Image (tube, grey):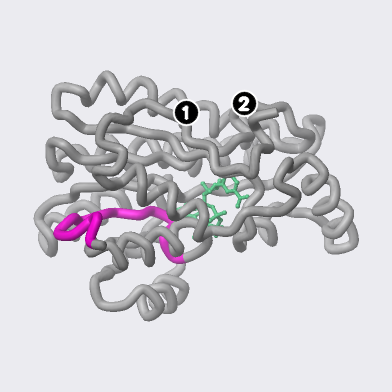
């Protein structure tokens, strides 16, 4: 036990789903975690679940002033970071023909720009030898109906991991991508699937997963813990898929 003993980790989107499960897993292994999200009430509920070694800072990852405030708070209260898990993300399914500029910009702002500046602005606080984990998605290398803007944002995230692996090698900072497949989290309820189509949509996805089931957030959190800890000490630049095989066939 204690794989992250003494480490300080930032997890964006840490108040729900994969981020929340990861915050719990990191704390269970000895880390102090900082979670962020846009909703203070949700952060408070999550902090109560995570327990003592957790702190919350409200903020929108696509807003650079919010990121500056986040890092100023972390600097004042904790002094540095060892792990940055840029995990916040959003998805609205829509046919190609229906995608508006507003949706396009929103998804790129949160999923691509948000990840970019979350990590860039963390660099002064991030210790040499640290670990950066970026949540992409198996959507980044697939063509899935309705996912096209989202998939492109996640391809950008996968690309950042490759670039930053070399950009940050002089500081011995490892950068890895985590690509979940279909995972049961609150995200499903925010994708814009009409209630009457939810069941058939679920079946359609399920048929494409070799393991025949959806993943859960705790399974993805285990992979995040692996990438955060010294268990992955010779691993950088990878795209670790936690997808029941869906992206591998
Ligand atoms: P989730 O909705 O529970 O978590 C996403 C979190 O990001 C939420 O807490 C949300 O409030 C936060 N967030 C969204 N926009 C934000 C913003 N602008 N600023 C700050 N926080 C913001 O869903 P999840 O499934 O846990 O998603 C986590 C990550 O995993 C996302 O990047 C998502 O794209 C990715 N992902 C999820 C699945 C899946 O099937 N659940 C599959 C592949 C990839």
Question: Residue 158 bears which disc, if any?
Answer: 1
Judging from the image, what secondary structure is the residue with disc 1 in? helix
Front position in the image: 243 or 148: 243
Q: Quadrant of the C terminus?
A: top right
Would residue 57 be counted in the magenta stretch? Answer: no
Q: Does the residue at mark 1 contact the one at mark 2 (Cβ under 8 Å)? A: yes
Residue at 44% x, 63% y: name it: 20
Q: Nearer the viewer, residue 233 or 151?
A: 233
Q: Which region is colored magenta?
A: 2-15
Q: Specify whether 129 is left or right of 174.
A: left
Specify the quadrant of the image occupied by residue 134: top left
Residue 27, position as x, y percentages in the image: 29, 66
Q: Residue furthest front?
A: 1
Question: Label 1 to label 2, Cα distance in Å?
Answer: 9 Å
The residue wearing badge 2 is 141
SS label for mark 2: helix
Of the pair 70 and 189, the residue shown nearer to us: 189
Q: Quadrant of the N terminus?
A: bottom left
């Amino acid at each position: 036990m204690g794989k992250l003993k003494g480490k300080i980790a930032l997890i964006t989107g840490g108040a729900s789903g994969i981020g929340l499960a990861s915050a719990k897993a990191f704390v269970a292994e000895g880390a102090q975690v900082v979670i962020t999200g846009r909703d203070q009430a949700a952060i408070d509920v999550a902090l109560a679940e995570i327990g003592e070694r957790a702190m919350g800072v409200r903020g929108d990852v696509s807003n650079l002033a919010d990121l500056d405030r986040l890092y100023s708070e972390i600097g004042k209260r904790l002094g540095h970071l060892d792990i940055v898990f840029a995990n916040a993300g959003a998805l609205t399914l829509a046919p190609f023909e229906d995608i508006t500029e507003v949706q396009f910009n929103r998804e790129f702002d949160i999923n691509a720009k948000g990840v970019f500046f979350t990590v860039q602005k963390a660099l002064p606080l991030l210790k040499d030898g640290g670990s950066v984990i970026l949540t992409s998605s198996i959507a980044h290398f697939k063509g899935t109906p309705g996912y096209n803007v989202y998939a492109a944002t996640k391809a950008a995230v996968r690309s950042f991991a490759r670039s930053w692996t070399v950009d940050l090698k002089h500081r011995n900072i490892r950068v890895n991508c985590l690509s979940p497949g279909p995972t049961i989290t609150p995200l499903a309820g925010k994708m814009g699937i009409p209630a009457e189509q939810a069941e058939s949509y679920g079946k359609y996805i399920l048929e494409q997963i070799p393991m025949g089931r959806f993943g859960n957030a705790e399974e993805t959190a285990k992979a995040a813990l692996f990438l955060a800890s010294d268990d992955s000490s010779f691993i950088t630049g990878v795209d670790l898929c936690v997808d029941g095989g869906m992206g591998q066939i």
